[in-house]
Image (spheres, helix red, strand yellow):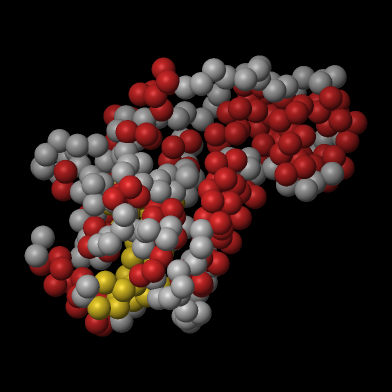
Amino acid sequence: MNAAMISPGAPPVDNLPGNGGATGSLYHPAMNTAAHSAHRAPRAAPQPFGDHLRHWRQHRRLSQLDLAQEADISTRHLSFVETGRSVPSREMVLRLAERLQVPLRERNALLVAAGYAPMYRERPLDDPSLASARQAVELILKSHEPYPALAVDRHWNLVAANRMLPHLLAGADASLLQPPVNVLRLSLHPQGLASKIVNLAQWRAHLFERLRQQVQATGDATLATLLEELQAYPVPEAADATHLEGEHLGVVMPFKFRTTHGVLSFISTTTIFGTPVDVTLQELALETFFPADEFTGEVVRQLAATL
């Protein structure tokens, strides 16, 4: 994932627990699912397991024969599972979910639909049991200074950042900086930072492709709605078709950004937890930004010296 902009109201790393600053939370309160459980809308009636399974099989564009071969079971048995004539074992549910590359959050839903307890925990990231993961995030963000870095959740909402990113926000409308801040909306909205991105057409195309891939991988309706919203944004009249070299989808994305300090050039990289067994950790991504030229490096180092 690539995201260049965050809210100046995001908790700075120095204010995170354990850093000796003012008491604060690394993650936006919206990430704390327990805190909002009382305000959730009533849940719809649960879908049968077979319906869940069919959805994911079709979403992955697999026939029953394809999936049966992948899972090393008979097509007849798979058909009976989808129609509800057979009840899958817990092991079978997990095997099918693995072959279908179902995200951990949805694997829990599959288990529950089949009558089993969820396997993967979902905890707020300030939970004591996730202290080591939280410390790793804090270390990456803080140690990356004087260069910008941030963390986002599965919907591209800001959850943490170091002290450097607010320097990129001058001119963004205040309404886009109210938490939870969606970094893609802030990036591409006409009242956000779109007019400041030199290679805006390239940047938009890159983000749209990444979102399409995420929607395909996760089946997340919120991401699909976000993609539709972003695609509907008008392109600023002053935008040009500048295309920067060095783009590698999913690995590196260069961009140039106009600031009061001059045009800054960055590349970004993404860090995720490699083998998570927690829903929240699987859905967390860290973005770290590096200067693409010496001028940008010198500017951000001078800015860091003023903090």
Residue lying farthest to the right in this orientation: 76
| Residue at x 26% of width, y 46% of height | 10
* In the image: residue 193, left or right of residue 216: left
Relative vertical location of residue 41 with respect to residue 231 in this rendering, above or below: above
- At which x and y percent is residue 116? 62, 19
| Residue at x 81% of width, y 28% of height | 82
| Quadrant housing residue 190 | bottom left
Q: Nearer the viewer, residue 17 or 186?
A: 186
Q: Nearer the viewer, residue 274 or 51?
A: 51
Q: Nearer the viewer, residue 50 or 131?
A: 50
- At which x and y percent is residue 20? 10, 42
* In the image: residue 167, left or right of residue 102: left
| Quadrant housing residue 144 | bottom left
Q: Is residue 161 visible?
A: yes
- At which x and y percent is residue 173? 31, 54
| Residue at x 29% of width, y 29% of height | 128
| Residue at x 36% of width, y 41% of height | 180
Relative vertical location of residue 112 with respect to residue 19 in this rendering, above or below: above
Residue lying farthest to the front in this orientation: 237
Give the number of callouts.
0
- At which x and y percent is residue 295? 24, 82
